[in-house]
Amino acid sequence: MGTFSHPITLFDASGRRSETLEALVDTGATFSSFPAPLLERLGVQPRDTIRVRLANGTEEDWRLGQVEAALDGTRRPILCFFGSPAAPPLIGAHALEAFLLTVDPVARRLVPKEAYLL
């Protein structure tokens, strides 16, 4: 499957300030990742530190927080990593599940999916 980007809006705790950015949709990433300076500017606080395996096989400890986000007009809280300032923003699997979205690999876009409780 090819890669593609999708806009995501992140909000501060008050919901008054927001920043919209183009983020790479990465179904292989457990959580989303946004540049730490952006999250800090929005007042997002780390809640935990998680051991992460990177694509090159190395492991690092990354800070994890929660941010209010909007995708396609819907707002929900998502978990996210405080990423490197130079790294591209990523929308990970947790956010896709939270927003009930899946990937259409042919059209390279996000599409709604059903919620299940089986």
Image (cartoon, helix red, strand yellow):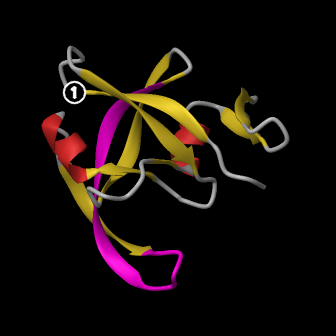
Is residue 117 shown to the viewer in this render?
no
Q: What residue is drawn where x is 42% and y is 53%?
A: 88
The quadrant in which the N terminus is found is bottom right
For the residue pair 52 and 38, the one nearer the viewer reads as 38
Please name the predominant secondary structure of the magenta segment in the image.
Answer: strand
Disc 1 is placed on an element classified as: loop
- State the residue lying farthest toward the bottom: 58
In the figure, 16 relative to 24: above or below? Answer: above
The residue drawn where x is 66% and y is 33% is 101
Give left or right: position of 29 versus 66. Answer: right
In the shown orientation, is residue 95 left or right of residue 27?
Answer: left
Above or below for 76 versus 31:
above
The percent position of residue 97, horizontal first and vertical second, equals 60, 40
Give the magenta-colored segment's residue range.
53-70
**Which image quarter is the C terminus in?**
top right
Check the image and report above or below for 85 versus 71: below
x, y percentage for residue 15? 24, 17
Which one is in front, 27 or 7? 7
Can you see residue 75? Answer: yes
Q: Based on the picture, tell me whether residue 27 belongs to the magenta stretch.
A: no
Q: Amino acid at mark 1?
A: Asp
Q: Position of residue 80 (x, y in %)?
A: 37, 49
Q: Residues within 10 Å of mark 1 (few under 14, many from 20)?
A: some
Q: Is residue 14 left or right of residue 116?
A: left
Q: Quadrant of residue 102?
A: top right
Dot 1 corresponds to which residue?
12
- Asked if residue 57 lies in the magenta stretch, the reply is yes
